[in-house]
Structures are given as structure tokens and as C-alpha cells.
Image: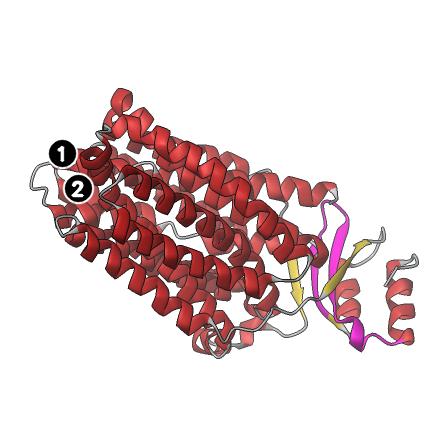
Amino acid sequence: MNSVEKRAIFGVGGIFALRMIGLFMIVPVFSVYGNDYAHATPFLIGLAVGVYGLGQAIFQIPMSLAADKFPRKPVIMLGLILFAVGGMIAANATDIYEVIIGRALAGSGAVSAVLMALLADVTREEMRTKAMATMGLTIASSIMLAFAFGPLLVGSLGISGLFWLTAGFAVLAMILLLVVPSPMRVLKHNLDSKSIGQQLSDVLKIGDLNRLHIGIFALHLTMTAIFVILPHQLSEVMGLSVRQQGMVYLPLLFIGFAIALPFIIIAEKKRKMRPVFLAAIGLMTGSLVILALGSHWGVGIIFGLLLYFMGFNLLEATIPSWISKRAPVANKATAMGLNSSSQFFGAFVGGAMGGLLLNQPNLLAWGILAIIMAAALLLIIPIADPPYLSSTTVTIPKNIDIQEWSRQMLAIHGVDELVVMAKEQVAYLKLDKTQLTDNARQELSHLAQSPLDI
């Protein structure tokens, strides 16, 4: 990776980590501490856990559509401001309705997809797989760490303190955004001429992207529901307080991650994304069956969670990379926005469902979640492997008109996308090598004013 890519991964990864930890720290503790708020009921507690997902689901697509038409970083900054304000409202809440409002506002800062699209802009195709996999692992690890540290911190900070941390993390994320390069995207086809309806239609017609949306929906539905139901079961079956439960999640996180990592590498480097992806969904389905049958015993809960975390890490690491490969060049943020909306709508449904299942028999509660994951697997099975394209890095010649130079580059047959970072004097070309003729290669080298290895 070059210095621009490393800086982008550090900045975007840090923003993701801060947002995810802030959002998810309250998930494993709120079903217990939420009872302290006025007017709290099991359903409203579950709603407070999952409502941020509804905000994300509603606003992810409009923000992503805007980010495909306008510069991405101002859209991200707006989202982080909303995220911070929502955290402050929840931190000062005295009744459950104020918490729900704060969580919903925090969720309306829906910039996950825009962050992914920005990262895709500033990484080459060959490095994008590694970058997106890194983001997937960052998201999965951040969520798991939030599940571990939320119970550990709530005893000393209180639930209000966790919400203040959320707001503080948002401010730190704004500072990190300054580290990320500011690219200028130059496309072969002008997106401004397309209506919002056409943008959405272009993406929704791609069946494999829709299957990935189903996968992320089921993943976050079950995950959020699990952590509404689980704290009470760990207390009843294993006698663990909420603070002690963090010490269950943390080792399971690292063990599950260590086991999943080789399979993530195989999926990316050996181009085995489809079998690994389907196996991960099957593994998660099996883990929920184990929890349905064995949740009366501590060993059943621990083993079921370990298998679930393995599958969770696999899916969170592979889906962003897959989206970046399969999404249309001009509608990258829109495609990622639909995926993120599916992800967070799943979290909203899972939070509300977890509240409804909280007082149901274990077999019924876990069995319903297992059926949902199994249904997702059946719908996703027809998915095909993603395409694998290539890109190259070009040093922008000095003393040229960058706009005219970019236009000439895009006019060459076989060049699909050009991302220019004028400050760094670097441009990334996305290429279909099967369409590049010898004349096209010579013309590219001429415009680059140096031989290109393509």
C-alpha cells in the first residue's frame, strides 16, 4: 500500500471504530439498566436499543445519493455532528422516550456507506480488497469490543456516562476525518444527468447486491436481538452480573476472530468469497440452533456464542469488499447506502424483536432467530462470485490542466474510472484490461509521461 492508502485506512478505520464502539456499548447492558428510566417497558427498552438502526435505515440512502453527486467529506461531517448531538440528548435523558429520541437522532447521522465509498475512491482496485476487508474486520472488532467494554464501564460511568462517551467519540471522529485524503472523482458517465430514481433503479436491478443486503439484514437483526436477550440468560444460567458478562464476550471475540481470520484470507486471496460467505451464514444458523437447544446450560451458551462470533466476523469482513467489487462505478455510494440501510434496519427490527422475545421461552426466542438466518441462507444461495478488476496508480504530471488531463484519460477505451487527489499529485485508474489495446496502453503512458505497467 502507498502512503495515501495507509492514511485513508487509518482515518476511515478510526472513524468507523469510534462510531461503532459508541453505538454498541449500550447494547449488552441497556436491557438491564434501561429499567431505571421513567416509563420503561420491555418493548420500549428494546426499541431504544434498536431505534438508531431505524434512523440509519431511513437516512443512509439519501446521504449516499448525495455523496454520489457531491463531495463525500462534507456529508460525513454532517453525519458525525448529528451522531454527537444524539449522544448528548441520550446522556441527559431522564425517561425512556428521551433516550429513544437521542438514539434515533444519533442514527440519523447515517454515513457508514459514504465512508466506505470514500475509502474505495482513494484505494486502488488491487488494494481495495485488503482495505475493505480491513474495514469489515474493524467494524466486527469494534462491535465485539463494545459488547465487552460496555458491561465493564457501565458500573463506574453509568448508562449516562456511556452516552457521553458516544458524543466524545463523535468529536474525535471529526478530527480523524481531516486525516483522510480529499479525492476528486471523474467518471466516464455523468451522474448529474440521472435522477435519484434512476440511480436507485440501476443498483436495485443487480440481484447479487440484493442478496448481500438480505445477508447484512439478517446478520444485524439476530445480533441485536441476541444482546437484548442474552444479559438476562447469562445472569440466570451462569450467575453473572452485567459487569462480569464483559469478561465472557471479550475472550469469545478474540477466539472467534482468530479462528475466522484464516478463512477471511482464503476468501480474499484465493477468490473463494462465495463458499466462505455461505458457510458463515450456515455456521450462524447452526449456532442459533445450539442456543435454542442448549441455553439452559452455560456450556451451550458459550459454544453457541463462539460459533456465532466466528460467522459474524466472516460476514462483516467480506460484505464490504464484495459490495465494492460488484457495485456500479458511478453508483458506489448508493449501493453501499442500500446495504447499510439493510444493516441498520435489521438492527432496528432485532432490537424491537429482542424486546418482544425477552420474556418468551428460550427455545422459542432462539428458534425464531435461527429460522430467520436459515431463510436468509436459502435466499442468498444463488449468489455468484464477485468480479475482479484491476487498477493502476499514476503520478499526475506537473504544470498541466488536471480537468483536461482527466478528460483525456477517461476518453481511452478500457478506462472506467479516474480518482484524482490533486494535493498528493496522484490519480487512480480503474481498468478493464480485456478492453485495453496496445494503442490504448501507449496513449495512457503518453498522458502519464512515464511507462505504465499495465
Task: Find the distance from the CA under tag 2 to the CA under tag 1.
Answer: 7 Å
Question: Is residue 424 on the magenta stretch?
Answer: yes
Q: Residue at x 57, y 40 (%)?
A: 11
In this rendering, is residue 243 above or below 96?
above
Image position of 58 with respect to 137: above or below: below
Residue in view at x 36 percent, y 43 percent:
83
Residue 71 visible in the displayed image: no
Q: Can I make out residue 375 in this image?
A: yes
Residue contact at pointers 2 and 1, CB within 8 angstroms: yes
Question: Is residue 447 left or right of 318 when viewed as pictured?
Answer: right
Horizontal side, residue 282 vs residue 443: left or right: left
- Label 1 crowd (10 A; few <14 / some 14-19 / many >=20): some
User: In the rendered structure, does residue 139 fall within the stretch colored magenta?
Assistant: no
The residue to which callout 1 is attached is 94
The three-letter code of the residue at mark 1 reads: Thr
Q: Residues within 10 Å of mark 2 (few under 14, many from 20)?
A: some
Segment colored magenta = 416-437
| Residue named by callout 2 | 98
In percent of width and height, residue 50 lies at: 26, 50
